[in-house]
């Protein structure tokens, strides 16, 4: 639990301490959105910021019985398979698990996306090819501000970030297979 909070804190610091002009664009967006005082707590499928841990598990159980969610193959992660669209036929798997505060309420969401047919020899299904689709999907789901590029801590690493009210969404490739997404409620504090 403490490691996840430390990871969130480090990612928040990276995003706020980024380099160059992209940082000023991010700072400007962050300041403007936080000044609005708008709350965007909805995440997906009835899951939202400040939702109690018990309610999250009950919702996941219900969605599992409906055949929408399954137990993911990645630790505690829940799995949802995105339906193919009219342009792309490749199946995408979404894995997610929330970040809870000391009151057992959701303050963030860790997500990972991968092509179901990913294989090391199939470069067309690598994470850098998937990232634009995930970015477009999240824009369609949430609307609001566009994603902007922020330089990450690794050389040549780009993190795509958007802030709408209190909700920040950050996207980056984790490795050749996985696109990682973090959704954060910027109004919550991180417990040590």
Image (cartoon, rainbow, N blue to C red):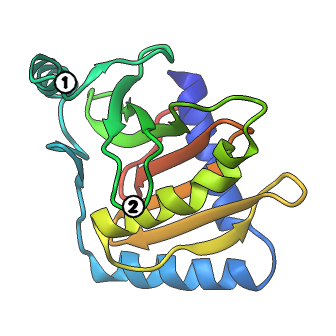
Which residue is painted at 32% across and 68% down in the image? 140
Which residue is painted at 14% across and 26% down in the image? 63
Horizontal arrangement in the rendering, residue 106 relative to residue 179 (left or right):
left
Horizontal arrangement in the rendering, residue 91 relative to residue 55 (left or right):
right
Q: How many marks?
A: 2
**Of helix, strand and loop, which one carries label 1?**
helix
Horizontal arrangement in the rendering, residue 123 relative to residue 172 (left or right):
right
Q: Quadrant of residue 139?
A: bottom left
Residue 155 vertical placement versus 77 (above, below) = below
Is there CB contact under 8 Å for labels 1 and 2?
no
Between residues 121 and 47, which one lies in front from this camera angle?
121
In terms of sequence position, does the residue under pointer 1 or pointer 2 come before the other?
A: 1
Between residues 130 and 172, which one lies in front from this camera angle?
130
**Of helix, strand and loop, which one carries label 2?**
helix
- Please provide percent x and percent y for residue 163: 44, 70
- Please provide percent x and percent y for residue 161: 55, 66
Residue 60's disc number: 1
Residue 86 vertical placement versus 110 (above, below) = below
Q: Quadrant of residue 18?
A: bottom right
Q: Which residue is farthest right?
A: 155
Query: Which residue is tagged 2?
Result: 138
Q: Quadrant of residue 35?
A: bottom left
Horizontal arrangement in the rendering, residue 114 relative to residue 57 (left or right):
right
- Please provide percent x and percent y for residue 155: 90, 57
Which residue is painted at 14% across and 43% down in the image? 46
Between residues 156 and 90, which one lies in front from this camera angle?
90
Q: Is disc 2 surrounded by few (<14), some (14 to 19) or many (20+) residues within 10 Å?
A: some
Q: Is disc 1 surrounded by few (<14), some (14 to 19) or many (20+) residues within 10 Å?
A: many
Label 1 – label 2 distance at C-alpha = 21 Å
Residue 189 vertical placement versus 62 (above, below) = below
- Please provide percent x and percent y for residue 111: 46, 39
Which residue is painted at 69% across and 53% down in the image? 128
């Amino acid at each position: 639990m403490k490691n996840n909070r430390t990871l969130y804190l480090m990612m928040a610091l990276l995003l706020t301490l980024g380099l160059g002009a992209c940082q000023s664009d991010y700072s400007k967006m962050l300041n403007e959105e936080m000044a609005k005082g708008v709350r965007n707590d909805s995440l997906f499928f009835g899951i939202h910021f400040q939702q109690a841990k018990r309610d999250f598990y009950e919702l996941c159980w219900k969605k599992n019985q409906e055949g929408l969610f399954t137990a993911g193959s990645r630790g505690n992660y829940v799995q949802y398979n995105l339906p193919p669209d009219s342009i792309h036929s490749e199946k995408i798997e979404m894995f997610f698990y929330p970040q809870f505060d000391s009151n057992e309420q959701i303050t963030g969401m860790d997500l990972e996306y991968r092509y179901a047919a990913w294989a090391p020899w199939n470069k067309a299904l690598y994470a850098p090819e998937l990232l634009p689709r995930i970015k477009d999907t999240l824009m369609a789901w949430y609307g609001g501000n566009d994603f902007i590029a922020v330089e990450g801590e690794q050389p040549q690493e780009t993190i795509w970030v958007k802030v709408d009210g209190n909700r920040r969404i950050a996207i980056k490739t984790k490795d050749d297979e996985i696109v990682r997404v973090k959704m954060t409620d910027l109004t919550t504090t991180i417990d040590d």
